[in-house]
Amino acid sequence: MELPVVNDEQVEILLSDLLEQYGYDFTGYSRASLKRRIIRLYSLDKALSFAEFRYKVNNDPAYFKRFVEQITVNVTEMFRDPQFFKTLRETVLPKLGTYPFIRIWLAGCSTGEEAYSISIVLKELNLLHKSLIYATDLNPSVLEKAAQGMFALGQMKQYSENYIAAGGTMDFSGYYSANYSLAKFDDELRRKIIFSTHNLVSDHSFNEFQLILCRNVLIYFDRDLQNNVLELFDESLEDLGYLALGTKETIDFSPVNKKYKRLPAHKIWRKVS
Amino acid sequence: MSTCDAFIIGGSAGSLDVLLKVLPEIRPDLPFPIIIVIHRKHGADSLLPDLLSSRTKLIVKEADEKEKIVAGTIYIAPSDYHLLIEMDRTFSLDYSEKVNYSRPAIDVTFQTAAEAYKNKLVCLLLSGSNADGVKGLKTVKAWAGKAVIQDPDSAQVAYMPEQAKKHVEIDRILRIEDVAEFINLLR
């Protein structure tokens, strides 16, 4: 079986089912990745036929939940791209530190690794007490995991290296306690994070922020949807606020780009007008 | 009528040397794009495009998401992302789980390109120490594309092309010194 078990037409059928049945709009997602993940799930769950697969998605709420969780990408890590976190620590957050209160939106937070990373940096800069991180994702199940603040202990070596490369000077293992195969991060880090569902495709702006991070989410969207989301971010960002995207993402193709100035060599833009 | 709309090269350990030997020999008026997916360590980025760029007159660049794939350009899969080809022959990037312990995974690019280019696709698998790319070549064949491998005897690490030879009906087996000519004669 080398030809795909789910064809393009069937992908479109599933996408319109999701929209009609559940109000989840994936039609602006790039197809190659989405299709690959649908095929992956289809094989993983050993679906007997497309009809059966489709029936389950449409009629079994628990399976629908699994479907959404599996077709979206939820791979993330702490202090991913250490250089980026170094710039946050040394340039962006100190600037925001002059404000009486710092509001941060982490859009597409997945299982929360980045939220805790930011929290750690804020704490070390002595800014955590006056900060609030809104960490959002469209998947309720990843948010539940994020709220627990428990990550695989086996990852900690890598995360600790990332942390040091990102300019961290404390003992990283001081931030969690080991519990069997899990590392449970301090409640203090969690206290300033609000985990909440938000769908970038269909939900509106809900606050004004000084920093919005959305890294490696836009790559899954087509250009039109990317532009809509960048406009949503623009509406939600204060003047002189910062927008941070993933290494391979840009605002260059969006009309909002005229209002922004890029920090040299980084995927961070500051709203200047 | 063209027989090749895209040429994709996958490789792992021992493949960089092959690229450095082959690229200077590639004709500068290449009528199709070359897309390169090789395993490399995440981090010290942009070095590979610069290195390869110094060996050819063709444009060498890292593939950008949503970028239209055009003839005469050599695209390199960015480190730590999977590189996918959309049906409209643009690139997509994806930060999903590693495949065959690799990101970028050769399988992912081969498999998505197979459907986008069908019988106008030629894929070459070079030296390497794991079997990434083998499933991808099978998909390429299923969509009537061509599967080509480096001669395992000429590979620094024979495992990858050997696995392909074992599991896929290979169209051509090339020694290093024949790779450039093979590419230059494709239309």
Image: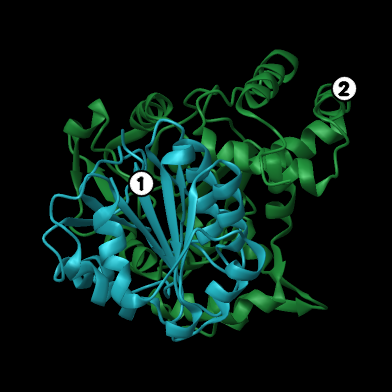
Chain colours: A green, B cyan
Q: Is residue B68 left or right of residue A172?
A: left
- Identify the residue shown where x is 37% and y is 37%: B90
Q: Quadrant of the C terminus of chain A?
A: top left
Secondary structure under badge 1? strand
Residues at discs 2 and 1 in contact (Cβ within 8 Å): no
User: In the image, what residue occupies the spot 42% across and 71% down?
Assistant: B42
Q: Nearer the viewer, residue A257 or A106?
A: A257
Residue B20's disc is none
Q: Which mark is residue B6?
A: 1
Q: CA distance from mark 2 to mark 1?
A: 42 Å
Q: Is residue B91 above or below residue A83?
A: above
Name which residue type carries label 2: Asn
Q: Mark 2 highlights which residue?
A: A59
Residue A39 image offset from top left, x and y in percent = 69, 41
Count of numbered marks: 2
Q: Amino acid at mark 1?
A: Ala
Task: Check the image and report above or below for A251 versus A224.
Answer: below
Dividing the picture into quarters, in which one does residue A84 lie?
Answer: bottom left
**Residue B45 in view in this figure:** no
Q: Secondary structure at mark 2?
A: helix
Question: Residue B145 in the image: x percent, y percent?
Answer: 49, 46
Q: Residue at x 52, y 38 (%)?
A: B115
Residue A123's spot in the image, x, y percent?
48, 67
Question: In the image, which is nearer the foreground, mark 2 or mark 1?
Answer: 1
